[in-house]
Amino acid sequence: MQITPVIAIHLCAASSAFLIGPWVIWARRGAQQRPRLHRALGYAWVTLMLMTALSAIFIRDFNLPNLAGYTPIHLLVPVTLVSLFIAFRHLARGNIRGHRLTMTSL
């Protein structure tokens, strides 16, 4: 499979989210809490995860066992999108524990 622009976007977004994730948790759980940094990095992480999930929709492989070009790994797309929605709904309702559990499981 060649590296197309969609794959490059997907790879960069996923790698960046992977690198930013620990910082988001550290900003909230460190010895000194930094809520503004946690929120800023959190929004960046969510944006990167949305980019990762949405770009994955356009990456298809007809060589592997698939259904219309979508392989089993594509099941992570709706899981990611639904988890992000649930995490923000928890925040809107003031359920910080639910938000934390949803985001760490994501």
Image (spheres, rainbow, N blue to C red):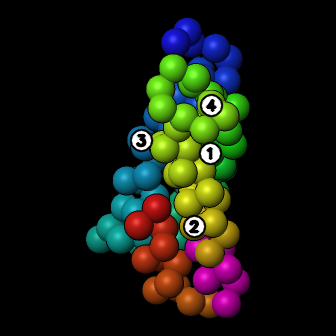
Nearer the viewer's eye, disc 4 or disc 3? 4
Q: Residue placed at 48% from the left, 32% from the top?
A: 65
Disc 1 packing (10 Å; few <14; some 14–19; many ≥20): many
> From which residue to which does the magenta span run?
87-93
Label 4, on which residue?
69
Number of marks in picture: 4
Disc 3 packing (10 Å; few <14; some 14–19; many ≥20): few
Label 1, on which residue?
53
Residue 86 found in image quarter: bottom right
Q: Amino acid at mark 2?
A: Ser
Q: Earlier in the sequence, mark 3 or mark 2?
A: 3
Q: Amino acid at mark 3?
A: Leu
Nearer the viewer's eye, disc 3 or disc 2? 2
Nearer the viewer's eye, disc 2 or disc 4? 4
Q: Horizontal and vertical percent for residue 3?
A: 57, 12
Nearer the viewer's eye, disc 4 or disc 1? 4
Q: Amino acid at mark 1?
A: Ala
Nearer the viewer's eye, disc 3 or disc 1? 1
In the image, taking residue 30 as reference, residue 101 lies left or right, namely right
Q: Is residue 13 visible?
A: no
Q: Residue placed at 67% from the left, 17% from the top?
A: 5
Q: Is residue 90 magenta?
A: yes
Mark 2 and mark 4: Cα distance apart in space: 24 Å
Q: Earlier in the sequence, mark 4 or mark 3?
A: 3
Mark 3 and mark 1: Cα distance apart in space: 17 Å
Q: Are marks 4 and 3 in contact (CB under 8 Å)?
A: no
Q: Is residue 55 magenta?
A: no
Q: Residue placed at 53% from the left, 71% from the top?
A: 35
Disc 2 packing (10 Å; few <14; some 14–19; many ≥20): some
Q: Are marks 2 and 4 in contact (CB under 8 Å)?
A: no
Label 3, on which residue?
19
Q: For the residue labelled by badge 1, is the local secondary structure a helix, a strand or a loop?
A: helix
